Image: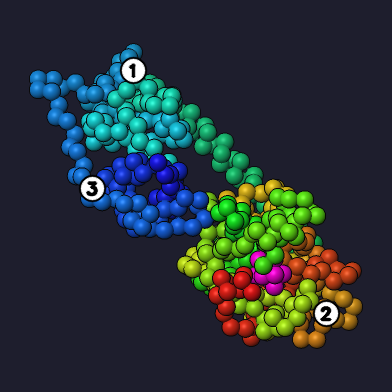
């Protein structure tokens, strides 16, 4: 029986067999428009993948036996020895633990009285709660009573303890405030500025899901699929991700890279003929596996006219199928002209040497964060002119082999795109973000990988 991954409430659940999916359909947890996938890389609607047919009406819970008021799960007895009756009449609640993912959740009154299996809200696993132990092991449902009302003496003792704790916390807060004020005065006298760690890192967390690793899906002649990371891209508009031309070139070279990884170097060129790029996608950082399919690519007009390794300007745009919720703002050309050496900047990206060596999870990638400063050459002002018509900012961020990554300021505005090419004597360079203006027309990604 086939198994599928499905998206429920923004989470990927599975793999689930078709019988389990039909149970979710009957309970109203999903419908024909729910996205499903076999390999979590290509998604279709549930009605297109599975013949759901007409669904039976959900079965009603069995009637309770006449002449008894005993529930299926007996509540626990209230703690004895308190001498109080304040807890009398309070209804206990029942906690169930999923035997698959160990998620703990509270059963509703309807679930407590129903004979139907309970559905785990975290992983979608269904299991009965009437048995002493669920299938697959794990704890049986637990009955947790409401706490009894403490006596007056106990309440007074507890109140006194709370007052003592509040007094201690207040004293600590006062000491911390004085320490912070003293540190602020010291920084003002010393003329120091706020460290980049306090400004750039929070911004990077805000825009982390706007960065993704570009993955070329390579297929061999037997239909086996291999994900090949080729670079970093970041969103500047809901449907547009920016990267560098090196990433675009590596999309075409993905079959050769996969064959060399699977075979020896000597036979790699021959084996690569058995592979082809089937699709390209962008897997977002820290999103739990969310990905966008790339449908078009925009490149510099000179891209097709040269065989050089570096194409100027070293920028490209990937047009996705869907919309990104997080997008980086762009600095204007006027703002770029005012940047000077020593300005603190940061980047988010995916160094390919780490991903290709297995140091990273392609199913749920997490972008690397690093910070540094802009640099300049003597007499060149804020930028280093590498070739006519292209301006690159020099920086000392440790971002080697992470082409296509964004370089941004403390407010999230992107000033440049990390270049896969590093000139001699330079730690690293990034292409000015305003070099995106004037690149070529969109090309279908399927046509691009065939040429």
> Mark 2 vs mark 3: which is more N-terminal?
3
In the image, residue 154 sits, relative to residue 107, either above or below, namely: above
Main SS of the magenta segment?
A: helix
Query: What residue sits 84% from the left and 74% below the top?
Result: 376
Q: Residue 257 falls in which quadrant of the image?
A: bottom right
Mark 2 or 3, closer to the camera = 3
For the C terminus, which image quadrant?
bottom right
Furthest residue toward top: 81
Query: What residue sits 26% from the left and 21% below the top?
Result: 74
Q: Which mark is residue 141?
A: none
- Where is residue 106 drawn, in percent x and y? 35, 35
Question: Who is closer to the viewer here, 117 or 333?
Answer: 117
* In the image: residue 215, left or right of residue 245: left
Q: Residue 337 falls in which quadrant of the image?
A: bottom right
- Find numbered disc 1 in the image and state the secondary structure of the residue it sits on: loop
> Mark 1 vs mark 3: which is more N-terminal?
3
- Where is residue 41 drawn, in percent x and y? 52, 55
For the record, the magenta segment spans 243-251
Q: Which mark is residue 55?
A: 3
Question: Who is closer to the viewer here, 448 or 89?
Answer: 448
* In the image: residue 279, left or right of residue 20: right
- Marks 2/3: CA–CA distance: 66 Å
In the image, residue 133 sits, relative to residue 346, either above or below, namely: above
Q: Which residue is mark 2?
A: 386
- Residue 155 visible in the displayed image: no
- Residue 74 visible in the displayed image: yes
Q: Which residue is mark 1?
A: 79
For the N terminus, which image quadrant?
top left
- Where is residue 205 drawn, in percent x and y? 60, 57
- Where is residue 335 drawn, in percent x and y? 68, 80
- Find numbered disc 2 in the image and state the secondary structure of the residue it sits on: strand
């Amino acid at each position: 029986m086939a198994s599928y991954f499905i998206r429920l409430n923004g989470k990927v659940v599975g793999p689930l067999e078709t019988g389990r999916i039909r149970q979710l359909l009957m309970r109203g947890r999903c419908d024909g428009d729910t996205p499903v996938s076999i390999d979590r890389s290509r998604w279709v609607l549930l009605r297109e993948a599975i013949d759901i047919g007409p669904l039976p009406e959900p079965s009603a819970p069995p009637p309770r036996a006449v002449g008894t008021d005993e529930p299926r799960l007996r509540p626990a007895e209230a703690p004895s020895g308190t001498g109080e009756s304040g807890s009398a009449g309070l209804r206990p609640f029942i906690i169930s633990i999923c035997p698959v993912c160990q998620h703990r959740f509270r059963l509703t009154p309807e679930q407590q009285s129903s004979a139907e299996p309970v559905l785990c809200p975290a992983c979608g696993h269904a299991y009965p709660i009437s048995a002493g132990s669920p299938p697959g092991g794990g704890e049986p449902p637990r009955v947790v009573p409401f706490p009894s009302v403490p006596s007056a003496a106990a309440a007074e003792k507890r109140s006194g303890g709370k007052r003592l704790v509040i007094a201690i916390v207040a004293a600590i807060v006062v000491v911390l405030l004085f320490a912070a004020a003293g540190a602020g005065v010291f920084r003002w006298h010393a003329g120091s500025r706020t460290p980049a760690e306090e400004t750039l890192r929070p911004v990077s967390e805000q825009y982390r899901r706007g960065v993704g690793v570009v993955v070329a899906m390579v297929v061999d002649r037997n239909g086996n699929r291999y994900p090949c990371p080729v670079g970093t891209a970041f969103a500047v508009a809901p449907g547009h991700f920016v990267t560098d031309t090196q990433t675009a070139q590596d999309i075409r070279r993905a079959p050769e890279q996969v064959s060399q990884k699977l075979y020896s170097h000597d036979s790699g060129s021959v084996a690569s003929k058995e592979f082809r790029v089937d699709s390209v996608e962008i897997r977002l950082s820290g999103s739990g596996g969310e990905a966008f399919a790339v449908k078009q690519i925009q490149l510099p007009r000179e891209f097709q006219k040269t065989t050089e390794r570096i194409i100027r300007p070293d920028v490209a745009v990937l047009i996705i199928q869907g919309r990104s919720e997080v997008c980086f703002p762009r600095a204007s050309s006027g703002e770029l002209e005012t940047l000077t050496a020593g300005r603190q900047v940061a980047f988010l990206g995916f160094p390919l040497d780490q991903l290709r060596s297995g140091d990273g999870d392609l199913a749920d990638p997490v972008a690397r964060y690093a910070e540094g400063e802009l640099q300049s050459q003597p007499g060149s002002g804020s930028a280093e002119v590498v070739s006519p018509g292209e301006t690159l900012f020099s920086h000392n961020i440790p971002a080697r082999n992470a082409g296509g990554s964004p370089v941004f300021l403390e407010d999230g505005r992107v000033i440049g795109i990390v270049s896969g090419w590093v000139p001699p004597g330079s730690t690293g360079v990034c292409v000015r973000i305003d070099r995106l203006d004037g690149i070529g027309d969109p090309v279908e990604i399927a046509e691009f990988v065939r040429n």
